Amino acid sequence: MSVETKLKDITVAAFAKKKKSNEKITMLTAYDYSTAKYFDEAGVDSILVGDSLGMVVLGYDSTIHVTMNDMLTFTSAVARGAKRCLVVADMPFMSYHLSIDEAVRNAGDLIKAGASAVKLEGATQHIINVVQRCVESGIPVVGHLGFTPQYLNVLGGYKIQGKTAGKTEYILQQAIKLQEAGAFCVVLEMVPEESAKYITDNLNIPTIGIGAGRYTSGQVLVADDILGKFSDFTPKFARKYADLASVIKNAGESYVNDVHSGVFPSESEVFHLDSVSLNELRNLCGDK
Ligand code: KIV
């Protein structure tokens, strides 16, 4: 049996190269085959199968309800759609906290599902050990610092992080630990622009910002925010490039009206019997 492992056009090496040449890295989240296919064709460097799917796809109020099974299902769908860009899968809440062995096994399962890298939040000594073991095992890792949604209950809400020089320095030290453990990039979420710049300027690996201003090595946004599909809340930093909520609602309303009025289905949307079968059917009707 021959197994083909095709490297994507965009690899972790491309991220490093972009940081060196000051070229911005583009990342968007996606959770399904079609969206991944279109973003891939649009030219993004990376698709993140974010555990934000817990809110925007599954309707939970936070990311902490997302399971490994959820992530495996959505990661494999995205991987089938993304032919050239780098697919990163989030490790969900409690999938990497209990032991290093379990964390590496779960990370490996996400790679087997089609991801090229995994992302995990925080930089405690346990997380640093997990990052190190993943990288030693051949699993590229993205870190995630600043606001870390899986720590929502500890942080006490959706709060900007790194709001003082001291707190900024603390995040930088966490990022340096991730870098030394082998992470190839770090997501910085909801930190002041000046803090994100300081952190970015003092790291060798690229930073990808979300709500972190203009000076990170790249940007990431949630698909449902840029597409205008998720309307429960819109963060200040999310730019809306489309209004899919209206498109979907209008399409639904038109369909309901067309069915009610008998306009759907039309002649071009139905199947017909051939003439022989039609005659047989008419005879059957006559028999009754
Ligand atoms: O889950 C997610 O979508 C994320 C982004 C906010 C970076 O982690």
Image: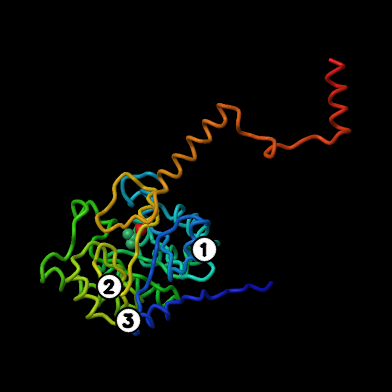
Depth check, front residue: 6 or 27: 27
Quadrant housing residue 2: bottom right
Q: Point out which mark residue 79 bears.
A: 1
Dot 3 or dot 1, earlier in sequence: 3
Which residue lies under the disc numbered 3? Answer: 22
Which residue sits at x=85%, y=23%? 282
Q: Is residue 1 visible?
A: yes
Marks 3 and 1, how far apart at CA: 28 Å
Marks 2 and 3, how far apart at CA: 10 Å
Above or below — where is 276 with respect to 55? above
Q: Nearer the viewer, mark 2 or mark 1?
A: 2
Q: Quadrant of ligand 1?
A: bottom left
Amino acid at the residue labelled 1: Ala
Q: Point out which mark residue 189 bears.
A: none
Amino acid at the residue labelled 2: Thr
Dot 2 or dot 3, earlier in sequence: 3
Depth check, front residue: 270 or 183: 270
Above or below — where is 208 with respect to 20? above
Few, some or many residues within 10 Å of mark 2 (<14, 14–19, 20+)? many
Few, some or many residues within 10 Å of mark 1 (<14, 14–19, 20+)? many
Which residue lies under the disc numbered 2? Answer: 216
Q: Nearer the viewer, mark 3 or mark 1?
A: 3
Which residue sits at x=18%, y=62%? 161
Q: Is residue 175 left or right of residue 57?
A: left
Dot 2 or dot 1, earlier in sequence: 1
Q: Position of residue 176 (x, y in %)?
A: 25, 77
Q: Quadrant of the C terminus?
A: top right
Amino acid at the residue labelled 3: Asn
